[in-house]
Image (tube, rainbow, N blue to C red):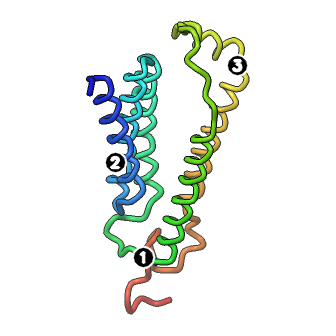
Amino acid sequence: MNWDAFLFGSSAALALIGALFAVSLKNIFHNILGFALALVGVAGLFLTLGSDFLAIVLLLVYVGALGIAMVYAVMLSQPLDTPRTPRSLPKIAGSALLAALVAMALWLVIRRAHFPGPPEVLEVAPQWIGRRLLQDYVLAFELISVLLVVAMIGAVMVARRDPARRAPGTAAGTAPRPGAPR
């Protein structure tokens, strides 16, 4: 086994393990760390495939986005010390069955697909990508920025609670004290 195959396999394993952690752990901070681990694995895959620029952009962009995601996850989630609702076994089994069916369908499609051989080497410089994004596709680039800002504002609005709708004697997100007047 050569060094490239080992790095590719270990990066793929890292991405899969991180993705499993991201969806299976119960603590939101552990989910975010699993997501980061999956992204590091994907960046490793890009490096082994010779796309250094894409790997670096993935790490730089998602490290910044991950910091913001952590802040929003803490802002919008329930406190970690509140009791968790138990997960129901039928929902878990249904999700696992659906994931297996989608994986099998993807495997069948990929197995039957005919992929052409590698094309001639195409060198794409970061300057070319930047020029295309900020000249040819500037409208789409700006619309995505506006969409992200609107999504963040919407998340903050959903997280805010109207004080007039709270029951008397309660703080935001808490139940009334035992024996407190209603």
Residue 137, disc: 3
Q: Nearer the viewer, mark 2 or mark 3?
A: 2
Q: What residue is shown with label 2?
A: 17
- Residue drawn at x 63%, y 31% is 114
| Place of residue 67 in the rendered image (x, y in percent of width and height, measured from the top left) | 39, 39
Q: Is residue 138 above or below residue 7?
A: above
Label 3, secondary structure: give it: loop
Label 2, secondary structure: give it: helix
Q: Is residue 119 left or right of residue 2?
A: right
| Place of residue 71 in the rendered image (x, y in percent of width and height, measured from the top left) | 41, 46
Q: How many labels, in total?
A: 3
- Judging depth in this view, the residue of 25 and 85 nearest the camera is 25
Residue 85, disc: 1
- Location of residue 135 (image quadrant): top right
Q: Amino acid at mark 3?
A: Tyr
Q: Are marks 1 and 3 in contact (CB under 8 Å)?
A: no
Q: Is residue 139 left or right of residue 127?
A: right
Instruction: Judge the density around disc 3: few (<14), some (14-19), many (≥20) Cα neighbours within 10 Å.
Output: few
Location of the N terminus by quadrant is: top left
Label 1, secondary structure: give it: loop
